[in-house]
Amino acid sequence: MPSAIIIGSGIAGIATALHLRAAGVEVDVFESNDYPGGKLHAFEINGFRFDAGPSLFTMPQLITELFELFGEQPSDFFQYHRMKSVCNYFWEDGIHFTVDADREVFAKEAAAKFGIDAATILSYLKNGQKKYELTASLFIEKSLHKMGTYLSVDTLKALAHLSEMNLGTSLDALNEAAIGEPHLVQLFNRYATYNGSSPYLTPGIMSMIPHLELYLGAYYPNGGMHSITTSLYQLALRQGIRFHFNQKIEQILVERNKAVGVKTASSQHFADSIVSNMDVFSTYKKLLPSQPHPERTLRQERSSSAVIFYWGIRGTFDQLDLHNIFFSSDYPQEFAHLFEHQTLFNDPTVYINISSKETSGDAPSGCENWFVMINAPGDYGQNWEALVAQARENIISKLNRLLGTDIAALIMAEDVLTPPLIERRTSSYRGALYGAASNSKLAAFLRHPNFSNKIKQLYFCGGSVHPGGGIPLCMHSAKITSKLIISAL
Ligand code: FAD
């Protein structure tokens, strides 16, 4: 039976293991933590349950299809539902707007609230849909590093519409021109953060991202985001995939330009294919120190990171829902601080996710579990203790202002996650949430391929390689990587 070793049990590592197993491959997963899931993890403090990382769930079919690979009924093991409203937005000028999940309703309500034509908003969203539909099969679903990808009808179709992809303009410039109204421009600019980029740098093609939420839908997995990890991990166990926790891989063994195995502190393991789900930068620097490195690819700018406060809050807030955003009043300055000055801005955009709105057991009665996140630069050795203390003050005074309450007095439980901690727990270089940033029009082509050009039988999956970060793209990377391996068997 062909065999594979996967380094890391992040969501792409587990999904790759499942695709390979379905094709009859014997799979061993080595994980340095004592739990599966990497960034998609959860924890509890004093009766408050928190999803540690991702909170927004789109494209659930990429999860459910993994159960179908083995003839299982997904709903027996993993349930989810579509959200009726996507996000609550708050601005410092007192405006509050809830985005409805139905794009026609959203356009009508936004038009009434912000005084612009509903048709203008709808046409913007349909344009994003067109970009998505023309490019997904090229940029997302296939390897960009195999000749066959460029010889397909889909590719020719996408190339014929290249001039409509707004590659030469920034997302912000596109939104200013197409929408113009400042609140809505900021709302649509925020989608750049879905891949850890700046709206002032990332190209206009990213206007396809709202299509995911406002047409394909925003979902909530029953029991919280961590149920994605637990249900897929259990599926993997049922299929005989072997997990080895607390097993940090220290080296990938290479013989005559071929990856043949891995080495931990105390043992060696061999397989026909080696897949790294570890960040590609750390894979080369730590596990392949004496092999040639693709330096240009590894030098690519990293996506933003985050500072997250996990707060157990005494009290409930009717004006809040699952996803809530409190916008900075100077968005350009916020991104200049993140990407140019590599520091935090004193008026940050604050995202609050409250899963107890959907799963009441996530917080004690009369309380809420607040996941409070601000965008942060990567870790370049800044004084995080001082930055976090200052950010906590800034966030609390912003929330006090906009919610008319004293938040600090309501915090009953607390933990914090910083860029260095993200790197320590998952090996993501500089604590990036989404691998490389998409702050240039060539970013998609500069990501590392799902295989090594130099070392045979070495493959890569996960948020730091093609097609990029975020759960849906990680699921696609697992599909692309496993297909490459299976076709080479
Ligand atoms: P990772 O989760 O990065 O896991 C890699 C695994 O490899 C880890 O378990 C690590 O321990 C293991 N590993 C590393 N080195 C070794 C070694 N030497 N030996 C053995 N094991 C090793 N995405 C969304 O879709 N929606 C969101 O709302 C969202 N929000 C986010 C918020 C935060 C705070 C964070 C951190 C991320 C967020 N993301 C979101 C991004 C998403 O979490 C990631 O893109 C995705 O989970 C990455 O999965 P991965 O498979 O690349 O692996």
Image: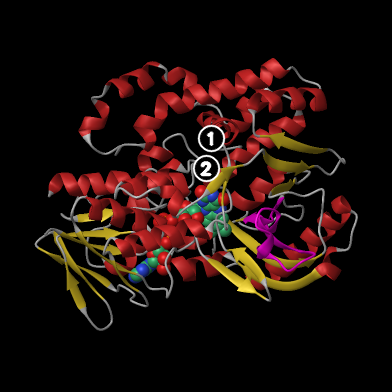
Q: Is residue 363 magenta?
A: yes
Q: Is residue 223 left or right of residue 263?
A: right
Residue 299 versus residue 285 in the image, above or below: above
Amino acid type for the residue under numbered disc 2: Thr
Which quadrant of the view contains residue 427? bottom left
Q: Where residue 290 sits in the image (x, y, percent)?
A: 22, 67
x, y percent for residue 7: 31, 65
> Does mark 2 have its CB less than 8 Å from ligand 1?
yes
In this rendered view, identify the residue nearer to me: 102 or 396: 102
Is 284 rendered above or below residue 32? above
Q: Are marks 1 and 2 in contact (CB under 8 Å)?
A: yes
Location of the N terminus by quadrant is bottom left
Q: Which residue has dot 1 on it?
A: 212
Q: Write the start and end of the magenta stretch as one range.
A: 350-375
Give, as a three-letter code, the residue at label 1.
Leu
Residue at 41%, 36% in the rendered image: 442
Q: Position of residue 153 (x, y in %)?
A: 28, 20
- Is label 2 in a helix, a strand or a loop? loop
Q: Position of residue 412 (x, y in %)?
A: 77, 73
Which is more N-terminal, label 2 or label 1?
2
The answer to if 47 sits in the magenta stretch is: no
Distance, label 1 to label 2, CA atoms, is 7 Å
Is residue 386 positioned above or below 72 on the image? below
Q: Which mark is residue 58?
A: 2
> Residue at image x 37%, y 63%?
282
Q: Is residue 339 left or right of residue 451?
A: right
Q: Residue furthest left?
A: 256
How many C-alpha atoms fall within 10 Å of the one at disc 2: few (<14), some, or many (≥20)?
some
